[in-house]
Structures are given as structure tokens and as C-alpha cells.
Amino acid sequence: MSKPHWRHAHATDLEAVSAIATRIHPDLSERPEVLAEKMRLYPDGCRVLAADNEIAGYGLAHPWIQYRIPPLDGFLERLPDGADCLYVHDVAVLPDFRGGVARAYLTEIEQLARSSGITTLALVSVYGTRVLWERFGFQPVAADGALRDKLSSYGASATYMLRDLTA
């Protein structure tokens, strides 16, 4: 068995990505078409964790505007002009393959951001994973009313977080 590694996602990976999303996020499901759109709009930020002949995880990221959280299960339609962050939409890994792989994906996304002239990563922490993201250098943002409204579709524990790549 070879060591799992991240590679660029392909359209043919959508079925596996969607199945993992449904398994890892049963309460935050997104339609396959929504996941496919992210993969199509910004293929550089979309990776899958390849483990021999199966997909064991995925990561989806795309340029975005800070504090404008994309709606869960909503279409982006297009990437914004003047993006000031790389938004990490989701990183999901099957339980048997966890242990260091999320950090490897984030390292690749950080390099992608830097090469694109972007100095901030953004994400929404769900399922109480805030501590994990803090270990990766993300800081929680105090949510005002507007931000809380945007976070509501992501669940009660959702926290908007930013990571400054210039620090």
C-alpha cells in the first residue's frame, strides 16, 4: 500500500468526493453539482487524497472576499474580482487516513495563495474543529450580526477563521 498523497482533483473524482462529503458531513450536505462547480471554477485549489486506487479525502479551496462567507450548498457562479483570500471551503478525510494529511493539503494551498499574491486564508470551522484549525495558525473572528447570519447554515458551532500568511 502506497502512502496517501494529494493530487489535483479531476471531474471523474466527483462521485468519490460527493460520497465522502455525505459521509463526513451528514448534517451539512451539499449537492454534487455545487462541489463540481468549485472544482470547475478553481481546479488549482481542489485536490483529492489518493490512496492506492481509492479516494480517501478531498480539499476544496478558491479565491474569495474576506467576511463574505459563501452559502452552504450554494453556487458561486463566478470567482470574485479582487479576491483577498483563499477560502478553504472544505477538507474532509476518511477516518482511517487521518493524521497529518490535512496539514499537507494546507501547505499546498498556502503555497498556491502566495504564488497568486494572496496573503490570507479563510475558512468556517464546523463540528467543533476550531482547536484543530488554531493549531494550523487560523484565528477565530468575532462574529457580528451579519457574520452570524451567514454562519447559521453551517451549524451552531460554526466559527469564521482567518490565517495571515504574512505573519
Image: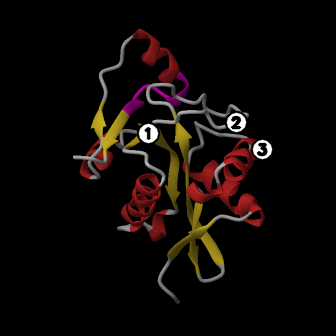
* Nearer to the camera, 134 or 23: 134
Front label number (1 vs 2): 2
Tell me how far mark 1 sits from mark 2, CA to CA. Answer: 18 Å
Tell me how many marks there are.
Answer: 3
Q: On the image, numbered disc 3 is attached to which residue?
A: 33
Label 3: state its secondary structure: helix
Q: Amino acid at mark 2?
A: Arg
- Give, as a three-letter code, the residue at label 1: Leu
Residue at point 29% right, 52% down? 136
Q: Which residue is mark 2?
A: 78
Provide residue 147's location: percent of width, then percent of height.
44, 18
Q: Position of residue 47 (x, y in %)?
A: 58, 62
Viewed as shown, does residue 123 lie left or right of 30?
left
Looking at the image, which residue sits at the far top? 145
Q: Which residue is more in the foreground, 46 or 49?
A: 46
For mark 1, does the 10 Å Cα neighbourhood hold few (<14), some (14 to 19), or many (20 or more) residues?
A: many
Q: Is residue 47 rendered magenta in the image?
A: no
Query: Crowdedness of circle 2 by 10 Å Cα count: few (<14), some, many (20+)?
Result: few
Residue furthest out toward the left: 167
Gap in angstroms between the C-alphas marked 1 and 3: 21 Å
Residue 24 locus on image (x, y percent): 55, 51
- Please give the name of the residue rendered at 58% of the width and 74% of the height, measured from the top-left corner: 50
Ranked by sequence position, the earlier of labels 1 and 2 is 2
* Percent coordinates x, y for residue 107 in the rendering: 38, 62
Q: How is the image coloured?
A: secondary structure
The residue to which callout 1 is attached is 123
Which label's residue is closer to the chain start, 2 or 3?
A: 3
Which range is magenta? 152-160
- Please state which amino acid type lies under the numbered disc 3: Glu
